[in-house]
Amino acid sequence: MMADALRLEVIGREGGGGVSGGACGSGMGGGDDDSLDMGPPTTSSGACAGMSDSSLTQYLASSKMKIDELFIQWLSLPESQKLVLSLLEDAQAGLPLVGPSGSTSSGGSSVGGSGHGGAGVGACSPLSPSSSQSLFAATTPPLSPRGSGGSPLSPKSPARRMGMPFVGPSISPMKKAADTRHFIPQFYWPEGPPAAKEAKSQCVSKANQLFAAGNNPNGLGMSAFGPVTRDVCRVPSFFNGCLFRKVDSDNTGLVSKDKFIQFWCEGTPNLMMADLPTRVFHVLKQADRNFLVQDDFRPLLRELLATHPGLEFLHETPEFQERYAETVIYRIFYHVNRSGNGRITLRELKRSNLISAMKHVDDEEDINKVLRYFSYEHFYVIYCKFWELDSDHDFLLGKDDLIRYGQHALTYRIVERIFSQVARKFTSGVEGKMNYEDFVWFILSEEDKTTERSLEYWFKCIDLDCDGKITAKEMHYFYREQLDRMECMTQEPVLFEDVVCQMSDMIKPEKDGEITLRDLKRCKLSGSFFNILFNLNKFVAFETRDPFLIRQEREDPTLTEWDRFARAEYVRLSMEDEGEDGSNGNGEDWDENLEAPF
């Protein structure tokens, strides 16, 4: 119907006339009679009254085919195409389709009746605005405007069914919707939201007070910059040196008030409006990087060692200060750097608990109460365990050294897999040797098999063909050595078939016979799965269900397996040191050369 209406409209706009016809026949004027002949001429509105039904159907079909043919010929003309495009644009905009005026012929009548002589298309009046609007409105309802005035009546509304006339919109609905669309304020700021005037004024006022209290018109030195770090920037106090050097980019030794405000309140990103992880990230990172590396944390740890009251006892032993700082950095990258590429991104920093641990360090005087990353007791345990295994003290461990870990708890086959570096590439640079950093990764993975990092570490070791799944064949390869060791220790061996059933019930893999890393991460007993395969001491403890360990877990469920291990090992190492002290009499003849690492 839309195409037929468009034909009528464009023919009317061409100025050739209108439409005339009787009950069934029609004629066209204003052109060549031969080319426009569509059948027998009509002489009156009842000219077809005597036709049979079949003849009438054939007549109507041939007339429609002729109209279509003529319409296609007309539509191919450039002027016609411009006219059609104009009509389509008006229809899309919701404007009424107005036919040409002033081109009526004498004796013309409205659609529905005409005489033969002088009638036809030229004898009829063109489509009027009201008729063309009604014709198109019956087939294509206008676009619904989105303004406050409400949408017009739809063709099927109750009012339309009752015979109420349809009134189109007075302006373009699309234009009206565009004028009344809601404004969506910006909600994502890649470089941080802009500083609010009130927040900036408060920051500047506080900075004015602190810089005025410094009694130096040129600015503040590093020691006097501490209150600005704590009260204005609201970052941990041991960030003072890093922040001062960041602002004092010219290394003048002084930071003026204007330079600080420009860096903190007007820089990119706007650190004044940023959250704490973003502030820490941008204070620590280098200007040409978008990530943190290990060296970025070393100045921070040096200041922590120099200022924290819980680490004052290390001031006289700088070599152990360096080891403590290295251990903290290795632990940070072990847990925070999920990608394992040695580069901590802002996203990884925000997803970690490092920022809360830093705040805890700043508030807590006892460094050993900060169990995450910074505990000195944890460092003491790690370093002493490494020192015990490093028999030649070259700060490198070989396979023979690592096999003695935990009183020979590990199997030879798992040690071979560790030194194949399939789980993690060694950073020692020496073939067949692991350094202190590699050992930190090993001991954290071995003593706490509940973390995702440790599960990934050991999964790679057990997955011999690196196909992403552990099969019964791979489990049997590692468990066979466990069986031999149990027989040598005169313990009743546990058959592999029983172990497989037990582990399957424990892990509940999605696919029988294949254990994936996803299965292990869903299970809370994944650590026992690995202990069964290559750690005999922990396997036996799991089988016997040591009540001492169960009581420890119930006493403080917030402690991790690593926390409980480090606490027990620190007590053992402390007792050994005290025993060594007692063996030297009253301590007056103590030989410093025999002193332990601490």
Image (cartoon, rainbow, N blue to C red):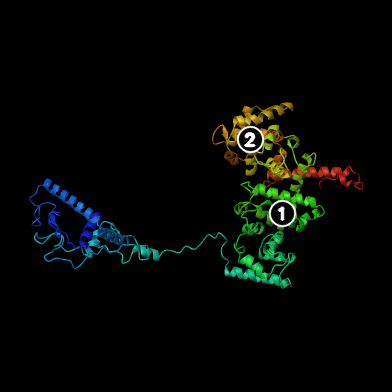
Q: Nearer the viewer, residue 262 or 141?
A: 262
- The numbered mark at residue 462 is 2
556 relative to 274, above or below: above
Say how many tags the image has: 2
Left or right for 335, reference 5: right
> Are there few (<14), some (14-19), or many (20+) residues within 10 Å of tag 1?
some
Left or right for 203, reference 62: right
Q: Give amino acid for label 1.
A: Arg
Are the residues flagged by discs 2 and 1 in contact, CB closer than 8 Å?
A: no
Q: Give amino acid for label 2.
A: Ile
Q: Position of residue 364 (x, y in %)?
A: 73, 56
Q: Nearer the viewer, residue 227 or 587?
A: 227
Identify which residue is drawn at 66% across, 67% down: 260
Q: Nearer the viewer, residue 94 or 544?
A: 94
- The quadrant where residue 143 appears: bottom left
Q: Position of residue 414 (x, y in %)?
A: 68, 34
Asked whether residue 432 is in view, the answer is: yes
- Where disc 2 sits, the SS reads helix
201 relative to 138, above or below: below
- The quadrant where residue 454 appears: top right
**The N terminus appears in which quarter of the rendering?**
bottom left
Q: Earlier in the sequence, mark 2 or mark 1?
A: 1
Q: Position of residue 331 (x, y in %)?
A: 69, 48
545 relative to 365, above or below: above
Which residue bears the numbered disc 1? 298
- Where disc 1 sits, the SS reads helix
Asked whether residue 1 is in view, the answer is: no
Left or right for 566, reference 105: right
